[in-house]
Amino acid sequence: MRNCLFALCLLFSSPLFAAESKAPPPASQPNETWKGPAPENHFTVGGMGGMAIVGNSVGGVILGSVATKIVNRGFVPDINNQVFIEFQAGPIFLSNFTVLGTSLHLRWDFHKDDDLTLYGLGGMGALLLGSNDFPSEFYPRFGAGVIWHLVAFDIRAEVSHEWITAGVQFNL
């Protein structure tokens, strides 16, 4: 048993001591993954639909969104990332009532290449137009998503504690 452990340790540690024979990687190219030029759009508008979670209830949601770019080369200068401030709002349809879901957040886009963008978001959300049975509430909002860039529009999907949605986005 001890010989097997010694052999495994030697096997996994040998790459640490081996001399590197590869040439250093070339300097970043404009089309290199995560390093390309920043997209030219400064505004986005879109619509998404999906499933909403409100307390112990699950229902449908239809959201509209509008965003404007506030930082062009993001907080990490070595990679292609932008920061948008975004507002989303729309009705949430539950079994016995409808509320208005809203969110004001920062969306931090990380562009892998010309086709794919991953993003994270953080800000404040609210459920408005409540009744005595369901009062309005405000809460911190965090989520993640993906944007697939097509020629005329983008396909966007997002997941957070409040909703799981998919839809389209237009770059202006």
Image (cartoon, grey):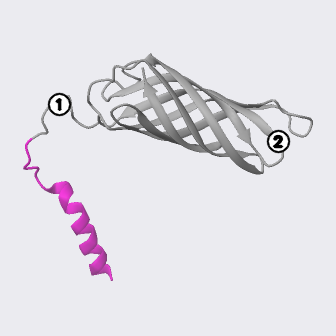
Q: Quadrant of residue 49?
A: top right
The spot of residue 19 in percent (x, y) is: 10, 52
Residue found at the very far bottom of the displayed protein: 1
Front position in the image: 69 or 29: 69
Q: Identify the secondary structure beneath mark 2.
A: loop
Q: Is residue 102 above or below residue 147?
A: above
Q: Give how far apart the Cα atoms at labels 1 and 2 are.
A: 53 Å
Seen from this angle, which residue lies furthest right? 132
Image location (x, y in percent) of residue 129? 81, 29
Q: Amino acid at mark 2?
A: Phe
Q: In the image, which disc is placed on residue 29?
A: 1
Residue at 48%, 36% in the rendered image = 168
The secondary structure making up most of the magenta span is helix
Depth check: give the residue in front, 123 or 38. Answer: 38
Residue at figure coordinates x 20%, y 28% from the top left? 30
Which quadrant, please, contains the N terminus?
bottom left
Residue beneath the point at 7% across and 50% down? 21
The span shown in magenta is: 1-23
**For the residue labelled by badge 1, is the local secondary structure a helix, a strand or a loop?**
loop
**Disc 2 marks which residue?**
97
Crowding around mark 2 (Cα neighbors within 10 Å: few <14, some 14 to 19, many 20+) is few
Going from N to C along the chain, the mark reached first, 1 or 2, is 1
Q: Amino acid at mark 1?
A: Gln
Q: Position of residue 2 (x, y in %)?
A: 31, 79
Q: Which mark is residue 132?
A: none
